[in-house]
Image (cartoon, rainbow, N blue to C red):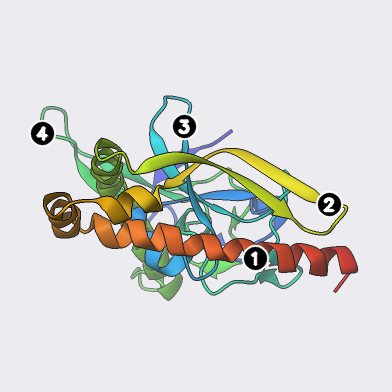
Amino acid sequence: MTRNVLLNNVDHHDLRVIARHAGDYGDSVNQALILPTEYEDAQRDYPILFRRDDAGAFQSVVLLGLDPGENLFLGEAGWQARYIPAIHRRGPFMIGLQGHEGEGPGEPMIHVDLDDPRVGRETGEPLFLPHGGNSPYLEHVAGVLRTLYSGLEVAKPMFAALDALGLIQPVELEIAVSEEEQYSLAGFLTIAQDRLADLGGDALEQLNRAGYLRLAYLVGASLGNVGRLIDLKNRQRAGV
């Protein structure tokens, strides 16, 4: 159940939000959605993969664990990585389009889910300063939401361009954690590196001008982080 409302400094002047990461707050997942605006930061920590949503549209995810509900980057001290996906940093906040009928899509505004367990008035980070201005935490959240909003605008045309050039292909990850324990992860897609290398000048220029060529290379480079997942999994099994 959610109760999403437009955030304002009158009704919510004393609202606080617990900003830490934990399984109770939805962080125990083995995949997290990310957007193209996050690729540069995310590829330093996680493998970036593609998949299709229920409607058949492409979306990108980072792989956080090998078993269902397993986030190998989440521990007692919180999320242990240089970059945390924006979808998890946004907390109980989201963007809603606020406008008047007949005046276009509306202006993006911050909304908050008042039923989220992180929201309250006793503990957590304040959202507003005593005299009504935004707190540093709320400014941080606004930046995260801008990353998500701008990323949504990039994602659809990026996937369309990559798909039109035949650069998106299925991939099945065969991950050997040990001689006894292996994982076969299906249902994912990635960039076809051989096709990318064979692209002619016009296609390369088209991707480069749109900013998608660099993103494609970042996705390919990120797959080296599968080895980090194996290391984290082995440390977990060893109780380290």
Q: Given this view, does label 4 or label 1 mark the residue nearer the observer?
A: 1
User: Can you identify the residue that label 1 sits on?
Assistant: 227
Going by the numbered disc 2, the residue's amino acid type is: Glu
User: Can you identify the residue that label 2 sits on?
Assistant: 181
Q: Distance between the Cα atoms at labels 2 and 3?
A: 29 Å
Q: Residue at 23%, 42% (x, y): give it.
A: 161
Give the number of the disc on residue 103. 4
Task: Give the mark, 4 or 1, whose residue is nearer the N terminus.
Answer: 4
138 or 65: nearer the eye?
Answer: 65
In the rendered image, residue 108, in percent from the top left (x then y), is placed at 26, 48
22 w.r.t. 195: above or below: below
Task: Give the mark, 3 or 4, whose residue is nearer the N terminus.
Answer: 3
Mark 3 crowd level (few <14, some 14–19, many ≥20, 10 Å Cα): few
In the rendered image, residue 17, in percent from the top left (x then y), is placed at 56, 61
Q: Residue at 24%, 36% (x, y): give it.
A: 164
Q: Are marks 4 and 2 in contact (CB under 8 Å)?
A: no
Give the number of the disc on residue 115. none
Q: Residue at 26%, 58% (x, y): give it.
A: 213
Quadrant where the C terminus sits is bottom right
Going by the numbered disc 4, the residue's amino acid type is: Glu
Q: Distance between the Cα atoms at labels 2 and 1?
A: 15 Å
Secondary structure beneath dot 3 equals: loop
Task: Give the mark, 4 or 2, whose residue is nearer the N terminus.
Answer: 4
In the rendered image, residue 181, in percent from the top left (x then y), is placed at 83, 52
Q: Distance between the Cα atoms at labels 1 and 3?
A: 26 Å
Q: Are marks 1 and 3 in contact (CB under 8 Å)?
A: no
Left-right relation of 223 to 175: left
Going by the numbered disc 3, the residue's amino acid type is: Asp
Q: Distance between the Cα atoms at labels 3 and 4?
A: 31 Å
User: Can you identify the residue that label 3 sits on?
Assistant: 53
Q: Given this view, does label 1 or label 3 mark the residue nearer the observer?
A: 1
